[in-house]
Image: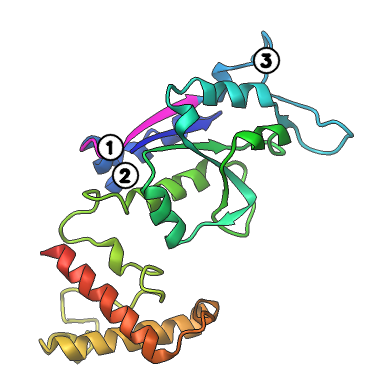
Amino acid sequence: MKAAVATVFPGLFTAFLETGVVGRAVRDGLVTVSLLDIRDHPVDARGSVDDYQFGGGAGMIMRPEPLFSALESLEWGRDARVVLMSPRGRRLDTGLARELAGEERLAVFCGRYGGVDERFRTAVTDEICVGDAVVSGGEIPAMFLLDAVFRWIPGVLGRLESAESDSFATGLLDYPRYTRPAEFRGMRVPEVLLSGNHGEISAWRYREALERTRRVRPDMLEDGMNDKEREQRFAEVMRRADRAKE
């Protein structure tokens, strides 16, 4: 995948693109990420990229000229899926992340100040929100988006990792996970996980994931599926995850 991020603070992405799963994807050549500094396309000698909004109101607005110029500076910009990180956008979920991972070209724009000039939205294919809270700019949401997307690109996750079994991918929150030691400060790992009985382990994981989801995110269960159908889906996702480790 070819990706680009347009921002007034490109330095924020330096460590992000060198670290963890994202850094490995970049180093292995599975993705290339270009950083577009919107300030490289100012509208005047002072380097301005924003201005007061017509009609009055608080907050400066990012002007359309620098945004369009940044997009047009990409050789492949015309063929890109163009995402604007926006609180009024579609909520990011696993399905959308997987969908975007199938794109060959992805351009992500990070808003700042009081927002972007409405005319830039004519060049945008997707407005995406990562949560119902306002932050100072689109940079952190863009990192969230890219991490979620890159995980679904074949080859990005290592042999012992699988996006298939993550929270949300199964339709449920993640089940409790444990590692060594089997006992720590009087707290023991559930005996079923030490039993070697994979059928009982799978059933336990499903029950725990379902209970956690009912307790923390009951809205995730409002999909018309009954518990039996949900259990079958969970089991199939886990089987695919196990095959991915082989």
Rendering quarter of residue 186:
bottom left
Q: Upstream in the sequence, badge 1 or badge 3?
A: 1
> Which element is circle 1 on?
helix
Q: Is residue 222 above or below residue 19?
A: below
Image mark for residue 22: 2
**Range drawn in magenta:** 28-36
Kindly check if marks 2 and 1 are in contact, taking CB atoms under 8 A apart as contact: yes
Which residue is labeled 3 in the image?
43
Image location of residue 84, percent across then percent down: 57, 41
Q: Within 10 Å of the Cα at label 1, are there few (<14), some (14-19), or many (20+) other Cα atoms?
A: some
Image location of residue 160, percent across then percent down: 17, 61
Label 3 to label 2: alpha-carbon separation: 33 Å
Rendering quarter of residue 195:
bottom left
Label 2 to label 1: alpha-carbon separation: 6 Å
Q: Is residue 44 above or below residue 242?
A: above
Q: Within 10 Å of the Cα at label 2, are there few (<14), some (14-19), or many (20+) other Cα atoms?
A: many
As shown in the figure, which amino acid type bears the numbered disc 3? Val
In the picture, the quarter occupied by the N terminus is top left
